[in-house]
Amino acid sequence: MAKQVFINLAVTDLQKSMDFYTALGFTNNPQFSDDTAKCMLWSDTIYVMLLTHEKFLNFTNKPIADTKTNIAGLFSLSTDSIDEVNNIVNNGLNVGGTEPNEMRDYGFMQQRTIEDFDGHTWEVFYMDMSKMPTE
């Protein structure tokens, strides 16, 4: 079995969050979705679990961080082109996401940031390894 990554995010509005992640290019896996959780696939091995606060609290004794004002993690999505970076972020902005800063260009990598309605932060990037500095 291939190793998989599941990122669990506490969200305040499950349907609105599912619509946001769908706009970014994720697809819903109904097998692991119900009224308290939506499983969103980025690839065959990368999943984002959108969980209501009540459901999320079943997995932890810690309080849920306010990710609108505090950073709890940076999640990154690689793409095949700068056009794909722009399409993903623009689609997210069109459904109400926010872009907290301008695109960053590191020469070998271009990166944009988008936040969902709960403030979860995603770095969407394209990296051209042929332009990677050697030193």
Image (cartoon, rainbow, N blue to C red):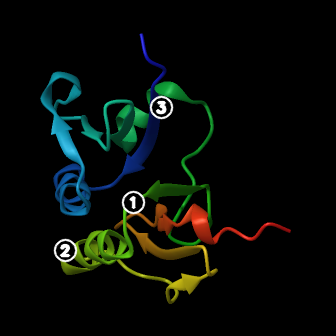
Disc nearer the start of the sequence (2/1): 1
Residue 3 vertical position relative to residue 64 in the rendered view, above or below: above
The amino acid on which the numbered mark 2 sits, given as a three-letter code, is: Val
Disc on res. 5: 3
Front residue (pair 66, 120): 120
**SS at mark 1?**
loop
Number of residues whose C-alpha sits closer than 10 Å to that of mark 3, classed few (under 14), some (14–19) or many (20 or more): few
Number of residues whose C-alpha sits closer than 10 Å to that of mark 1, classed few (under 14), some (14–19) or many (20 or more): some
Q: Which residue is mark 1?
A: 79
Image position, residue 114 (x, y; %): 42, 72
Screen quadrant of the N terminus:
top left
The amino acid on which the numbered mark 3 sits, given as a three-letter code, is: Val
**SS at mark 2?**
loop
Number of residues whose C-alpha sits closer than 10 Å to that of mark 2, classed few (under 14), some (14–19) or many (20 or more): some
Front residue (pair 108, 119): 108
Q: Is residue 110 left or right of residue 31?
A: right
Q: Quadrant of residue 46?
A: top left
Q: Which residue is mark 2?
A: 95
Front residue (pair 125, 93): 125
**Mark 2 to mark 3: distance in Å?**
26 Å
